[in-house]
Amino acid sequence: MKYSGLLRWVFTFYLVFAFYISLTFTIQFAYFEVPQQSAGAGGSSAAYWVSEAFANSSVKINTTVYEQSSRIGGRTKIIKYERDGISIPIELGASIFVDVNYYIVENAKKFGLEFMKYGEEMENSKTGIWNGDEFVFEQSSNSYWDTARILWKYGWAPIKVQNLVKEIIGKFLEEYKYDKPFTSIDSEAERLQLDKEIKFTAQYYFSELEKINQLYLKHFVEPMTRVNYAQNLAELHAMGAFISLAPQGAKSIKGGNYQLFEKFIEHSGANLKLDTKIVKVTKLKSPGGINNMKYIVKTKDGSSEEYDAIILAAPIQFTGIEFENMDFKIKEIPYITLHVTLITGYVNPAYFGRAKIDDVPEQIVTTNSEKCEFLSFAGKLQLPNGETISKLFSHQELSDEMLDRLYTSRSWTFRKVWKSYPKLLPNQTFPPLEPDENFFYINSFEPYISTMETECVSSRNIVKLLAERWDGIYLQPIKAKL
Ligand SMILES: *[C@@H]1O[C@H](CO)[C@@H](O)[C@H](O)[C@H]1NC(C)=O
Ligand SMILES: *[C@@H]1O[C@H](CO)[C@@H](O)[C@H](O)[C@H]1NC(C)=O
Ligand SMILES: *[C@@H]1O[C@H](CO)[C@@H](O)[C@H](O)[C@H]1NC(C)=O
């Protein structure tokens, strides 16, 4: 695919399935102890940051990671499509990260993992924007022509939006330069000067505050928030829209993103307890412990361990953990239920009002219209027999009846439902990041920004707080630039 520089991003409809990871883990120190549970981006990176921050400290930390399932990865997971001796890994959950996701990119490099460019397996694929009746825009093979058509139709809107995206990402990158940890999501949003972006819906922000052309919002911006966060412009905050629009250099880890999280755990030296469900956490008075208190973590098999601090790395309402002697109230954050459907088969061009399959774009995003039966349709790759493997996102389960209209034949259909990310509601009350003393909550950051990278940002911030409190060594800020 060729792009003409300036408007490059207009065509990059990467599916920033910006989903994160869940992990609840436990750090337990020689004389300070902490647990965590459930290991995705947040939990696994937290274990790693702890090992870094306390590597050369006189305080020795004994970290335990509790993972209720039998694997590391949280909301990243691959499924292997296997046929005729070929085996193709497909990301089912959080699929891509981008160049400016420094904690992901730099650590993946450090651990020797390889990257795969988004869409690498389906070269020369074209994107179309579907409104349920017709394509309101289709990418051609001539990017100059596409650019000209867009400018003609939408004026300066694409350039204005692109500049805003740059400005917002630039502001966010300031976070990587701070020594000082933040203590609440609101204070962090203010420090980054990115608080206005969570006060308004993306619709109000772009159309009323920034005066962006309505048609452009409908045709280009909203399809991106729909594919990335399954939310329309009038539903999510502007920050969510900006994250959806920033997919420069989209990539994933070859063989599956979960491998990075496995590496984080491996290199952290933490005790890993797979298949271990925490049922109860009790706060106890413990003279001599840190702040004269301890946490008792009880698991389903009936055993219990004592810890000095806990890092919870899963959306709290999905953990089912009972908290005893802890009087915090965390407002439940509503999550989106996302249906992911993988299909191998032959797409029916008639579904899109076309005569030939070659006339149907391989990548389809949708406008906010009742007539769209799915949020997005991503062609992943073509098999030697001409069938394609595609990934669809939708709010509801895609019925066999609907799939039989969309496909002339299907040889494989796989369905998976996720609680993929929070509803990114404007003006919401963020959960506390330290709901009780030395009890931290990584996913408090998610309703602000929900990506694999920002789970790592949140976990690193929590470890900075621990280091400050317990004589660890400050994690060095890293160089981050656009
Ligand atoms: C700990 O100290 C050693 C030796 O001084 C150094 O090589 C290493 O980078 C330090 N580790 C961290 C995480 O700072
Ligand atoms: C670390 O914690 C684990 C699990 O609680 C325990 O089995 C182990 O003995 C501890 N190690 C040290 C050095 O305290
Ligand atoms: C959020 O609160 C601000 C005032 O702080 C208000 O101006 C804005 O309209 C509110 N946004 C929504 C979507 O209600």
Image (cartoon, rainbow, N blue to C red):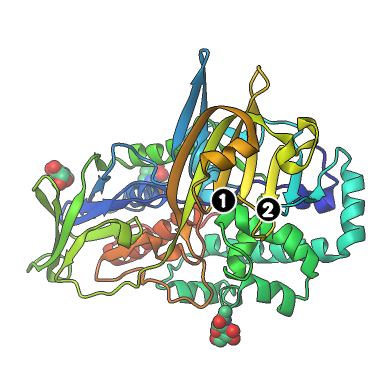
Q: Is residue 80 left or right of residue 11?
A: left
Tell me what residue is drawn at x 76 percent, y 37 percent. 360
Classify residue 301 by image quadrant.
Answer: top left
Q: Is residue 49 visible?
A: yes
Q: Is residue 71 above or below residue 327?
A: above
Element type where label 2 sits in the image:
strand
Q: CA distance from mark 1 to mark 2?
A: 26 Å
Q: Which residue is mark 2?
A: 366
- 65 lies above or below 432: above
Q: Quadrant location of the C terminus?
A: bottom right
> For the residue carrying disc 2, how many other residues have a C-alpha within 10 Å: few (<14), some (14-19), or many (20+)?
many
Spot occupied by residue 391 in the image (x, y as percentages of width and height): 58, 39
Nearer to us in this view, 242 or 367: 367
Q: Label 1 belongs to which residue?
A: 101
Q: Quadrant of the N terminus?
A: top right
Image position of 172 (left or right of 6) = left
Q: Is residue 247 left or right of residue 439?
A: right
**Residue type at numbered disc 2:** Thr
Q: Residue at x 75, y 46 (%)?
A: 128
User: Which residue corresponds to the image point at 82% horizontal and 38% vertical from the top-left?
Assistant: 2
Q: Position of residue 85 (x, y in %)?
A: 51, 13
**Residue labelled 2 has its Cβ within 8 Å of some atom of ligand 3:** no
> Which circle's residue, 1 or 2, is located before the other in the chain?
1
198 lies above or below 360:
below
Q: Position of residue 80 (x, y in %)?
A: 47, 27
Residue at the spot 46% in from the left edge and 34% down from the top edge: 78
Question: In this view, which residue lies farthest toward the top?
Answer: 85
What amino acid is at disc 1? Asn
Judge whether 295 appears above or below 278 on screen. Answer: below
91 sits left or right of 57 in the view:
right
Give the foreground label among 1 and 2.
2
